[in-house]
Image (cartoon, rainbow, N blue to C red):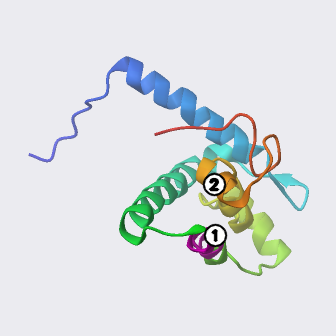
Amino acid sequence: DGNRNGWWTPAVIEGFKERASCISTLFSSFKLDGKHVNGNLTLGEAIADAGGLKMSWEAFLEKAKPDADAKRLFFIAMGQTWCQREKKVAARAELLTDPHPPAKFRVMGTLSQFAPFAETFSCPVGSKMNPAERCHLW
């Protein structure tokens, strides 16, 4: 009948909020031209990027049965998706109003939280792209 019915229990909602807070904090730690990203504003898109990466990776592994080179190319292609040049004035304005994280952080923020990326590129534990603690939502 088109009515929205919540099916998450209060405990599930609280767990989601707690795990989402990790992502918001991560993205708020990023700076562009000296200004912090608003992790609360960009949270929905950051969650979507992480979920899309996870689902596409799982599909890629299942369908392609990739070797090490193909795995590296998967992540390079993901990064190239967000490759762009932007004027500083526009970038600063977007920090205030755009619910999408800046392109650079859509790549670095998302991939740094994804263990298969660190494994594929042998990133040392504790490095920027393989932190000892990661945000896990799903």
Q: Tag 1: Cα neighbours inside 10 Å, few (<14), some, or many (≥20)?
A: some
Residue that lies at the very extreme toward the top in this rendered image: 11
**Residue at image location 32% in from the left, 21% down from the top:** 9
Residue receiving disc 2: 110
Whether the residues at callouts 2 and 1 have beta carbons within 8 Å, the answer is no
Q: Secondary structure at mark 1?
A: helix
Residue 114 visible to the viewer: no
Q: Quadrant of residue 19?
A: top right
Q: Tag 2: Cα neighbours inside 10 Å, few (<14), some, or many (≥20)?
A: many
Q: Quadrant of residue 6?
A: top left
> Could you say where residue 37 lies in the image, as x and y percent from the top left?
75, 52
In this view, the mark in front (2 or 1): 1
Magenta stretch contains residue 60: no
Q: Seen in the image, is 58 located left or right of residue 5?
A: right
Q: Seen in the image, is 96 located left or right of residue 15?
A: right
Residue 15 vs residue 43, the one in the foreground: 15
> Could you say where residue 110 lies in the image, as x and y percent from the top left?
63, 54
Magenta stretch contains residue 75: yes
> Could you say where residue 80 lies in the image, as x and y percent from the top left?
65, 77
Residue that lies at the very extreme toward the left in this rendered image: 1
**Residue at image location 82% in from the left, 73% down from the top:** 89
- Above or below residue 12? Residue 98 is below
User: For residue 72, which numbered disc appears in the image?
Assistant: 1
Q: Main secondary structure of the magenta part?
A: helix
> Could you say where residue 25 lies in the image, as x and y percent from the top left?
70, 38
| Magenta extent | 69-78
Identify the amino acid type marked 2: Thr
**Residue at image location 59% in from the left, 57% down from the top:** 99
Identify the amino acid type marked 1: Arg
* Quarter placement of the N terminus: top left
Residue 117 vs residue 11, the one in the foreground: 117
